Image: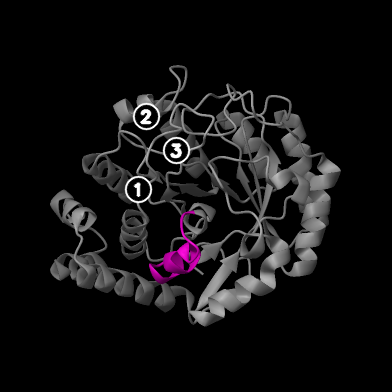
Amino acid sequence: MKTWVDRLRQEQTLPPEGYKALLVCRDADTLAYLHRQAREVSQAHFGPKIYIRGLIEISNCCRNNCCYCGIRKGNAQIERYRLSRETILDCCRQGYELGFRTFVMQGGEDPAQSSDWIEETVAAIRKQFPDCAITLSLGEKSKEEYQRFFHTGANRYLLRHETYNPTHYGQLHPAEMSQHTRIQCLQWLQEIGYQTGTGIMVGSPGQTTEHLVEDIAFIERFRPQMIGIGPFIPHRDTPFATSTAGSMEQTLILLSIFRLMLPNALIPSTTALATLAADGRERGILAGANVVMPNLSPREERQKYTLYNNKASLGAEAAEGLAILKKQMQAIGYEISTERGDFGN
């Protein structure tokens, strides 16, 4: 099994049977070797630096009805909110004082936050914080809208494809959404010049090892600058309320595979990992991740942005818990970096 790991590190690719062998591997010694190789590659490219991104969850209103998501249109139990532009700028100001040099605007596909509004908000952030990177994670838009945001000052866009298999995609999403549209949006983002991120939920209902091999093959072809993956965690007010959460171990295997495949990629250790296990964030870093995303959103709104049950949003997950996060990273041999941390740096 270790020969697959060595080959992936050397050649940055494997045949499908190699990826499948790693995905189904349960040998502790082999997995420890896989994670160690990924960690070495990450440190060779980035040193012991972990880049911080300030997450601002701008709205929990969404026009979509994805079966796995707690802020889906059909969830009548959630208290909805939208942040004003001034509140978003306040979040950026607080983050800037704490040392953040990347802001991530994430939200549902909220029709009330029009493209004009998003464009003007990006322009306001760019004007006040010219030395900062601006990442958007606001779902599917037209190519023209993506171009407008980019020309106004957005640098990065994160749009997880969730699953490359069209049939599986249909199991997770309403009929009006399509895997083809999602992939088209990702291609547009790359063509425009964004540092583009995609990714998947690990262990989503109906997912098979073959699906994951398809996802790996897509990411290998697409070569994103950012890869966001995390375990599926059910939400009580969705059709998947009683589904089993995704596996921590499987998520960490994929983290390491992607690090060895794309050594320069920006790969976060996600909030979902920290939600699934108290040491989940650290385990993600030790498997090859090099980004964390503390929450800059107003405290009173964080609990409303519930994509899944028991989402971590306080302590080291929060911007005000940066000192805790620094200690956690130091304990495993890493340091928080306030650099922008662009792709390949």
Looking at this rendering, what residue extends furthest in the top direction?
175
Q: Amino acid at mark 3?
A: Gln
For the residue labelled by badge 2, is the local secondary structure a helix, a strand or a loop?
helix
| Residue range highlighted in magenta | 276-289
User: Residue 167 at what x, y percent from top left?
Assistant: 30, 26
For the residue labelled by badge 3, is the local secondary structure a helix, a strand or a loop?
helix
Q: Amino acid at mark 1?
A: Ile
Query: Which of the pair 342/239 is nearer the observer?
Result: 239
Question: What residue is pinned by disc 3?
Answer: 187
Taking the image as shown, residue 120 lies to the left or right of residue 251, namely: right
Q: Which mark is in front, 3 or 1?
A: 1
- Quick one: label 2, few (<14), some, or many (20+) residues within 10 Å? many
Query: Do labels 3 and 2 touch, CB within 8 Å?
Result: no
Q: Within the magenta stretch, is there residue 95? A: no
Question: What residue is pinned by disc 1?
Answer: 219
- Quick one: label 1, few (<14), some, or many (20+) residues within 10 Å? many
User: Residue 10 at what x, y percent from top left?
Assistant: 23, 70
User: Residue 319 at what x, y percent from top left?
Assistant: 70, 62
Q: Which mark is in front, 3 or 2?
A: 2
What is the distance, in whole Å, between disc 3 and disc 1 at their CAs?
A: 12 Å
Question: What residue is pinned by disc 2?
Answer: 169
For the residue labelled by badge 1, is the local secondary structure a helix, a strand or a loop?
helix
What is the distance, in whole Å, between disc 3 and disc 2 at their CAs?
A: 18 Å
